[in-house]
Amino acid sequence: MPLPRLTDNELRTALDALPGWSVISGKLHRHYKFSDFVHAFGFMATSALAIEKMAHHPEWSNVYNRVTVDLETHDSEGITAKDTALAAVLDSIAVRML
């Protein structure tokens, strides 16, 4: 059974706790910028381990020192608590790489 999508109020509250994140095209969105490719790729590699444990995989891309992330729970057709939890994990990893 799919997780319930966050209400508008729940999403606003979540965004208040996730600086740098926004909603674009119905997905949680964040753009990270690192000092170089090694740090950007290191962020993705380190994040991959946490992502796999959560079994919740992002849409993301890397160009040199930038990583762009979009999160949504596909079977729920929107943003759920699973997305905000993953966003918080990604932020905690990124802060160590910046």
Image (cartoon, helix red, strand yellow):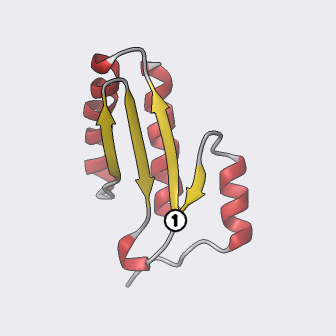
In the image: residue 30, left or right of residue 49: right
Splitting the image into 4 quarters, where does residue 97 fall? top left
| Position in image of residue 47 (x %, y %) | 33, 37
Q: Residue at point 34% right, 25% down?
A: 40
In the image: residue 74, left or right of residue 5: left
Splitting the image into 4 quarters, where does residue 2 fall? bottom left
In the image: residue 11, left or right of residue 57: right
**What's the residue type where badge 1 is placed?**
Ser
Q: Does 65 appear above or below 84?
A: above
For label 1, the SS is loop
| Position in image of residue 43 (x %, y %) | 34, 29
Outermost residue, bottom direction? 1
| Position in image of residue 76 (x %, y %) | 43, 78
Q: As rendered, which of 86 and 64 lies closer to the eye?
A: 64
- According to the picture, the residue beneath numbered tag 1 turns out to be 25
Outermost residue, top direction? 35
Q: Residue at point 41% right, 42% down?
A: 68
Q: Residue at point 31% right, 36% down?
A: 62
